[in-house]
Image: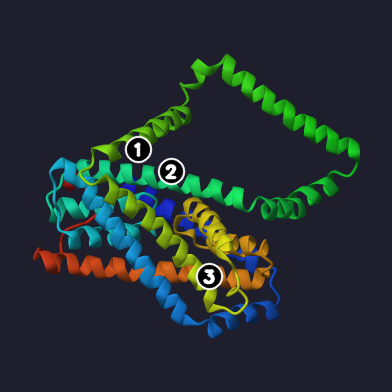
Amino acid sequence: MRKKLLNIFRFLFFLSIGIFFIWIFVRNLTAQERSEIIASFRRANYFWIAISICIGLASHASRARRWVILMEPMGYKPKYSNVLMAVFVGYFANLALPRLGELGRCGVLARYEKIPFNKSLGTVITERTLDLIVFILLFILNLVLQIDLIRQYVNEKIYTPLMHSLGSVENVGLLKWAILGAFVLLIVLLIVFRKKFYRFRFVRKLKDMGKGVWDGIWSILKLNRPIEFIFHTLFIWVAYFFMSWIVFLSLPETSGLGLGAGLAVLVFGSIGIILVQGGIGVYPAIVAETLVIYGISSIIGYAMGWLLWATQTIMLIIAGLSSLILLPVKNKVSYGFRIFNTEESI
């Protein structure tokens, strides 16, 4: 009972954060601006949105194939169709609670392919580790390629307003020295008390994460088909990129945006999805603020954010529900199985 209440609380907590961000943005809109957002949805060219959905499905199909390759060295050869539907079930579950998707898709394979839950979960952790590496590389690439635009945005939206709020030159100087002093103090504390820092749980987690990243990289070399695995890893992220960028073509105001804007939306939008479950409320706001850098009004940017979020979310809901229905039919088992009962799967 306690665990169920905790899950309900977590779901409501993340949902409330999303609703809060929606309220923050919408409360400052005029009636005309709200009408512009609604009009953007009506005049959008949904042909490009349909193409985006097809690209999204291709990325998930590639992810399923990559997962099959990861399980081969352990001696498991699951049916591709079951793995693909397990991936969709996982994404669908992730819309509700963090990390529930990883448990859900491993539970599917435990039920329908008799693959031990802990074995498949280990491959999912490797998957996530490698995706994290790719994301970090894309984040750095985005900063390098668009440093001038980002610097200009930071100066206009953050640095200049902050300097005005501080008032005098003396206050600005004191703030700079305070930041520098705090940074130096932090380094000194890390050096002097480095052994004691390892006693903190979050420090140990960071250390374990670093080790996991290293182990994940080396595990690729042990695969039967490392080249194909790397291809699918790259394809997944290229598909993610075009899945976002191609939706720009659905509105006249954003149709002229280049690939740089698509990369920025992919990187910063992914952060929003990480921060708030499913990205509800946060993702459209981040997309709107990101597109401001490229000269798009916040109203049009917000409409584009909702188009992107709705496209991806609806696709995952339909694919996830369809998979939950088709899995027992295709495998001829009872509908009564509880996908997320990990205790039965281990």
**Would you say 123 lies left or right of 303 here?**
left
- Circle 2 Cα neighbour tier, 10 Å, few/some/many (<14 / 14–19 / ≥20): some
- Cα distance between the residues tagged 2 and 1: 9 Å
Q: Which residue is mark 3?
A: 306
- Is residue 341 visible from the viewing direction of this image? no
Q: Residue at x 55, y 60 (%)?
A: 265
Vertically, is 57 above or below 15? below
- Residue 115 percent coordinates (x, y): 15, 47
Earlier residue among tags 2 and 1: 2
Report helix, strand or loop for mark 1.
Answer: helix
Report the amino acid beneath label 2: Ile
Earlier residue among tags 2 and 3: 2
Earlier residue among tags 1 and 3: 1
**Would you say 213 lies left or right of 39 here?**
left
Q: Which residue is mark 1?
A: 217
- Cα distance between the residues tagged 2 and 3: 27 Å
Q: Residue at x 76, y 48 (%)?
A: 159
**Would you say 305 lies left or right of 71 here?**
right
Q: Residue furthest left?
A: 332
Report helix, strand or loop for mark 3.
Answer: helix
Q: Are marks 2 and 1 in contact (CB under 8 Å)?
A: yes
Q: Which residue is mark 2?
A: 133
Looking at the rendered image, the disc whose residue lies closer to the viewer, 1 or 3, is 1
Asked where in the image residue 316 lies, by quadrant, the reply is bottom left
Report the amino acid beneath label 3: Trp
Q: Residue at x 29, y 62 (%)?
A: 61
- Cα distance between the residues tagged 1 and 3: 35 Å
Report the amino acid beneath label 1: Ile
- Circle 1 Cα neighbour tier, 10 Å, few/some/many (<14 / 14–19 / ≥20): some
